[in-house]
Amino acid sequence: MFTLKKIVVISFVLLFVCHPAAAKLKNKTVATPQPAPEKTDQATLGYDKGLYFKTEGFTLKAKVMAKIRYLYEYVNDFADSNTVALRMGRVDLSGYALDDKLNFRIMWGFDNNAAASLLDLYIDYKFSEALQIRMGQWKVPFSREYISQPFNLFMADWTDIVNYMGLNRDIGVDLHGAFADKHVEYDLYAFNGNGRAVANSNKSIYVGTRINFNLLGRPGPTLHDIEHSESPQWAVGFAAVYDLGSDLAAISGNELIRATADTVIKYRGFTFETEGHYQFNTVTHDGNFGIGGQTNIFVVPKRLALGAHADMILRDDAGALGDGNVNTWDVGSAIDFFIDADRFKFILDYTFYKNFTGVPGMEDHQFILQGQIYY
């Protein structure tokens, strides 16, 4: 005899058996666990703004650059000249190992039709974003314009103030990093002071520091705004070096203090960059002061830009570098036509130099047509 309890139980059993989900459950098979796929160390070769080779934990990237120029130069009281030259060539190998913690770079240069020479050779280990160490040979972190790569310039070349008052490549060690969400970047370094690919010729070195504040955005390494920044980009930098025994022939053994301050602003295709330099000889107490600036604007976004620059160098008595007290200055302008950003462009550049190379009254006119390729 069926009781109410038995009827309820039987009803639930029949409901479960007849329900479609029960059929699915009866037909469902339990999946056999599969072993995880083995990790492969497959190498890849490709192109992304440079030819690259990648494998697990290692990347190598190769780039080549060439600046080919025609130069017409007229110097008063001298015959004018016409020159076609390979102004600059670069073979650049860079990459990383150890899961992006160890970076390296090797770069050779072919400048002014000369034979190849080693420009950069360094390793850079990243403990954290705020603490990294670099050892080897590369550009001394000093003025903003000089540490910009040559293919990022707007003018055909670095301006005169950078060539005369800046620092060059050298062999040394640098503690560097960034913090505050990369709004503050710093370098703290020591270099031989004898230039690239040369052993230290004395017991002295030079030590220095650079600090950069990205106040608005991050202006980046270029000296133009081809990116057409939608918001203002503004950075300010300062650097100082104490040269404990300059290797310059005219003042060998003298100690120098070098300082620079710079700023760059970019916004909607417009760029303004300026920097000031000061050199002081602690033995002769002579000094040099220089200031320069450049500006440019895209009149056709990402394609055509117009720019101008001016520099001035003032010297005390014999000058901090012992090369006389003749003041020099220059002004110029340029038109840049970008075909593929900085990777392929043409530059038409004119510069007028007064008291050229420190010779009173010497005036130099330079017209440059330059093509640039960087891939």
Image (spheres, grey):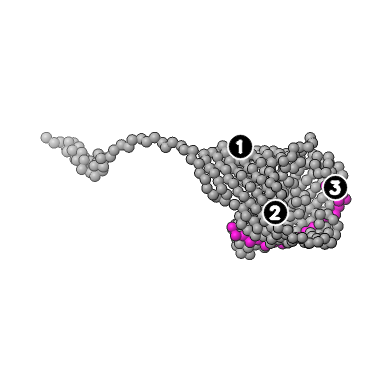
The residue type indicated by label 2 comes to Arg
Type of amino acid under label 3: Gly
Q: Tag 2 or tag 3, which sits nearer the N-term?
A: 2
Q: Is residue 297 visible?
A: no
Q: Where is mark 3, residue-wise? A: 322
Amino acid type for the residue under numbered disc 1:
Phe
Marks 1 and 3: which is nearer the front?
Answer: 3
Of the pair 244 and 82, the residue shown nearer to us: 82
Magenta part of the chain = 316-340
Compared across the picture, whether 118 is left or right of 245 comes to: left
Residue name at image x 56 percent, y 37 percent: 98
Residue at numbered disc 2 = 87
Q: Secondary structure at mark 2?
A: strand
Closer to us: 300 or 20:
300
Give the percent coordinates (x, y) of residue 310: 75, 59
- Picture residue at 79% right of the left edge, 56% below the top: 312
Residue 190 visible in image: yes
Tag in front: 2 or 1: 2
